[in-house]
Amino acid sequence: MKLTRTADLWWKNAVVYCLDIETFASSTGSDCGDIRGLTQHIDHLHRLGVTCLWLMPFYPTPDRDDGYDITDFYGVDRRLGTHGDLVELIRTARDRGMRVIADLVVNHTSAEHPWFKESRSSRDNPKRDWYVWQDEPPADGPQGVVFPDQETSLWEYDEKTEQYYLHRFYKHQPDLNVANPEVRDEIARIIGFWMELGLSGFRVDAVPFLLETDGQDDGDALPDPHDYLADLRSFMTRRNGEAVLLGEVNLPYPELMPFFGGVDGGNTPDELTLCFDFVGMQQMYLALARGDAEPLAEALRQRPNPPADGHWATFVRNHDELTLDKLTESQRKEVFDAFGPDEDMQLYGRGLRRRLPGMLDGDERQLRMVYSLLFSLPGTPVMFYGEEIGMVEDLSLPGRFAVRSDMDWAAVARQRVEPDSLLAWFRLLIDRYRDCPELAWGSYTVLDPGPGARSVLAHRCDADDASLVALHNLAAKKATAEPVLTGLAGRELHDVLDPLADPVTVDDEGRVAVDLGPHGCRWLRAGPGPEGSVA
């Protein structure tokens, strides 16, 4: 595959790294990280192979929800630095081949935002309709409390104006009325402002809630919310054709696909560029809990193809609770029993507040297998800071903060000089991921691993002149995978993770037998054939 064909769509083989500036690195030695501290550590990310830096909110905030309660969408929190510091970070990252995206959190504001203060000052204030107000909570309004440990309702009564305002999250985070044209224009200005400072796109927070219009009096007369998302994407693309929208859309596949847009035969997604694969992530944990690859294999079989220029974003965990809400109650209990049996390890009855190394009790062989899986699955891999060094959760911290503890720079320094460290494994995975463009660009097929190998996820990625077969044993016992590899009869497959390993020969019927140790993994690749194809 020619680089000239892939360079414009940089997101399809990117390595995304998410971090919270406040907990990543300090330039002054204080307890609070800052932008300058991050900039000073940018070469760690460069050596790792990161190509896209995702910044969690850095805007001014009362900090009641780790920065997701924003009081100024155009500002930089003074604890973290200045606009000048941010521009310097973006320029330095770009110098190392990294683009920078940031959280776009515009489905709500802080209750201390000037807009909301104006809105709640009187019913006839010009900013009144910038938020969603009702005399009584509507019966046909939004349902489901997001944080059941903190809230009992989605509506909060305001005594001064004697109406209720909508808050999908905490009561101190009132929802913006995105159906209001003035609000839409303001969101476009926010996007345009940060792009002028050098951002290459945004991770869009809670997209379904952003587009929700349930319960509004004029709901039937409002325009299609997806048209708005398409307009927003169009505006962004006009400003910068390489910019992306990475969407948090935690929905079943059929309900998620419309958020890409352009899925009816179009190559270009005209809404979100990438969507997180929450379904695949949750089925992966069920598969790990059972030592049986079938739940993940079935999710990959069912996962629809996005528009050709769009992509899935794959991840092991994110900055939030590790949600298991798409599993059945009995399936969720299996995962809880395996990886978070204590109630203190669980959150909201639907997820875990643990990092992977803690869940796996420090089993490095299993840990390496899971991250090998991350970088070989079809999609753009997204990392959360500290994963590359095996950081564990800090359960002494409240709620979701357990996985947002300070970056362990001492562990980085130690692992940097250890040839067999987890950090070295990550570098190898990322290097090989970039060497094998079929992983990002190719078509993929979930393979039958053969009789007696239910613990093995076998999948294949093909693109133009190369084919890669990835084998991952999710069980703590040996397994032999025997997939049938159509079109590769007689070919030699080379292990790209272990170049010294003997090649594996596919027999004349396209069969191959590969032994895998407990939690073993292999990437077996057939390069270009005599005519430049894998056949």
Image (cartoon, grey):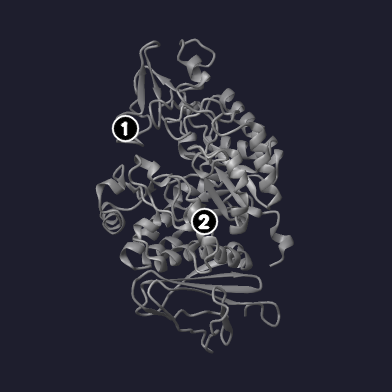
User: Could you tell me if residue 263 is visible in this image?
Assistant: yes
Identify the residue at the far bottom of this view.
508
User: Could you tell me if residue 270 is visible in this image?
Assistant: no
Give residue 338's position: percent from left, percent from top. Answer: 29, 59
At label 1, the amino acid type is Gln
**For the residues marked 1 and 2, what is the alpha-carbon distance in whole angstroms?**
36 Å
Quickly name the residue at label 1. Answer: 150
Q: In the displayed structure, would residue 71 be above or below residue 296?
A: above
* Secondary structure type for disc 2: helix
Mark 1 or mark 2, which is nearer to you?
Answer: 2
Question: Is the Cβ of the residue at disc 1 closer than 8 Å to that at disc 2?
Answer: no
Q: Residue at x 42, y 60 (%)?
A: 299
Q: In the displayed structure, would residue 104 be above or below residue 183?
A: below
Q: In the displayed structure, would residue 233 be above or below residue 378?
A: above
Which class describes the residues within 10 Å of circle 1: few (<14), some (14-19), or many (20+)? Answer: few
Q: Quadrant of the C terminus?
A: bottom right
Give residue 489's position: percent from left, percent from top. Answer: 56, 85
Give residue 46's position: percent from left, percent from top. Answer: 63, 55
Q: In the picture, residue 103 is in which quadrant?
A: top right
Give residue 487's position: percent from left, percent from top. Answer: 57, 80
Q: Residue at x 47, y 23 (%)?
A: 218
Quickly name the residue at label 2. Answer: 412
**Going by the image, does 527 lie left or right of 384?**
right
